[in-house]
Amino acid sequence: MIKKLIKRIAGLIFILVILSFLVFLLMYLAPGDPAEKRLTSQGVAVTKQVLDAERERLGLLKPFLVRYAEWLFGVVRGDFGVSFKDDMPVAPKLLQGLKNTSILALSSLIISIVISFTLGIVSAEKKNGIADHIIRVFSFVSNSLPNFLIAVLLMYFLCIRLSLFPVIAKGDFQGLFMPVISLAIPMTGRFVRQMRAEFMAQLSEDYVTGMRGRGVKRRFILFNVIRNSLGHIFTIVALQIGTLMGGSVVIESIFRWPGIGKLVMDSITARDYPVIMGFVVIMGTIYVLINQLSDVLCHKLDPRTRL
Amino acid sequence: MKKRIAKIKIIFVSILALLLIFVTCFAGLFAHNDPYATNALAIRTAPCLQYPFGTDNLGRCVFARVLYGGRTTIAATFLLVFISFVIGTVVGMIAGYFGGLADRLLMRFADITLAFPQMVVAIAVAGILGTGMTGAMISLGITMWVSFARLSRSHTLSLKNEGYIQTAFFAGKSDLYIIMIHIFPNLLAPVFTNALTQIGTTMIGLSGLSFLGLGVIPPKAEWGSMISEARAYIQIAPWAVFYPALATIVTIIVFNYLGDAVMDYREA
């Protein structure tokens, strides 16, 4: 067990190092010179000498591997460098954004898990009934909707037509409602489909037939079914975290939610490389960690699965 | 019986899908206005006879732009899925057939690619490569080929031990011949089904990138970027958002349903 855990952690570190290397390589190969971009945005007349001095100051002239190593050691210590845009350290910006994104992402995750869990059970138990058909159509359609479309349509109907909500989100509960719903709808669609399949697989197991034969009450059967599918449900949820991260970039830009996604979109326009690199590294790390954790949890909940 | 219902479903949805492709391919036959011609006299006109879907902020015909934009979206999606399909299948077959070090390296590489969140990588890559549909396609393609590679590898592994492959081998057929004539046709069905189910997701991803401004370069018509542009004046001209939105939803639903129907047929 401990040996396996160590092996996992080593694999994790390996993957993260590769991620950071690829990210750095990408920035290195990227078109556009950050030094020049920076100078022109500050209104300095760009001459050869000024440009070279600026490159020297930003450390752009050092060899690739040296720059990578310096950056990586900084990142490990929690220092993501300074922003090209305003010379402020990147880490606090990312952290602040991450906090806001977590509020948004976690609320929509919890809402869609609660809804899809209930719908999944109803749908699987009353297979081919009216409720099942309605739920399946709902989940199919919402799975086919891009979240930016949901956001734009919600904005039109709720903010402009019915003026129930402000168009630009403030940091309060009212401002949180629409981004959360736009993120939750497509996710719920996917969860319902997968959870329904999982519950149905459990319901067709021999132990369920046995319990039914012995006349065990419905809720006790359901209790057992839910207990046995919990491990897989963790995996289903963990795999959706990546989609959730991508979706929150879109949603945050639409609703101007001050999260890490909006930060990265602003940085892409400004070619502010340290912020983009920090974003990918942080999101990648969270994603990898969550997936590893869900594997371990899955094993704990269902010891038959291999770790 | 179940199989027949599934078959009828597939035929019905395929006709719809082909219709969509046909309409966007021959957009010139249906749309009489130039999608790029601006008209200062007809800015944000409501839908009427001359402009069936109304006009946008620059007086461009939304109907024509939806049709031509569909060409961009659908063509880019199909091209991306096709390229990922080819690369993934070739890599998967080689890895599965020859095994050994190449197999281990390729699969390790595939595992690492899968360890990253796809859309996060796509946004960063597309953002850095600069705008343009090619950048958006590359950024999504980086992670997309992996599912094809894994699928075709696992099928190649199970096919490799079949009697007829052994026979072909002992009859002195070359590796290339065995892969192309015996293995490829046999794994085509499952891998093709996977390609179909990927179309909807890819379309969502590509139009999402365009919406963020990481896809097509502005004057070019594309549904995601049209919605993003028209969103600013949705109060005055909601039709400039609704019709591209409707087109996106219908297209994604049709292709997702096609993927589901084919999956049902193969399982039934």
Image (cartoon, coloured by chain):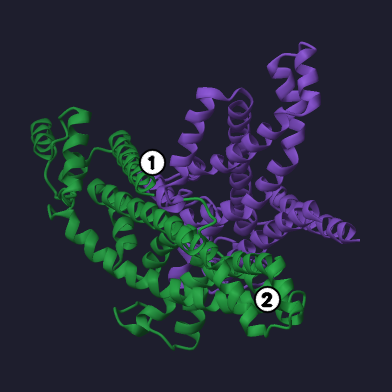
Q: What residue is shown at x 72% (from left), y 48% (from top)?
A: B26
Identify the colour of chain A in the image. Answer: green
> In the image shown, does A196 or B250 lie closer to the viewer?
A196
Asked if residue B256 is positioned above or below residue A139 in the image, the reply reads: above
Within 10 Å of the Cα at label 2, are there few (<14), some (14-19), or many (20+) other Cα atoms? many
Among the 4 quarters of the image, the one containing residue A258: bottom left
**Residue wearing tag 1:** B129
Q: Where is residue A129 in the image (x, y as percent from the top left)?
A: 76, 79
Q: What residue is shown at x 10% (from left), y 34% (from top)?
A: A56
Q: In the figure, the purple chain has which letter?
A: B
**Residue wearing tag 2:** A123
Q: Give, as a three-letter code, the residue at label 1.
A: Leu
Asked if residue A120 is positioned above or below residue B130 in the image, the reply reads: below
Give SS at disc 1: helix
Among the 4 quarters of the image, the one containing residue B246: bottom right
> In the image shown, does A243 or B125 lie closer to the viewer?
A243
What residue occupies the far front of the structure in this picture?
A214
Is residue A257 left or right of B179 when viewed as pictured?
A: left
Q: Where is residue B83 in the image (x, y as percent from the top left)?
A: 60, 36
Q: What residue is shown at x 17% (from left), y 60% (from top)?
A: A92
Is residue A106 left or right of B143 when viewed as pictured?
A: left
Within 10 Å of the Cα at label 1, are there few (<14), some (14-19), or many (20+) other Cα atoms? many
Q: Mark 1 lies on which chain?
A: B
Q: Position of residue A245 (x, y in %)?
A: 41, 60
Is residue A69 left or right of A181 when viewed as pictured?
A: left
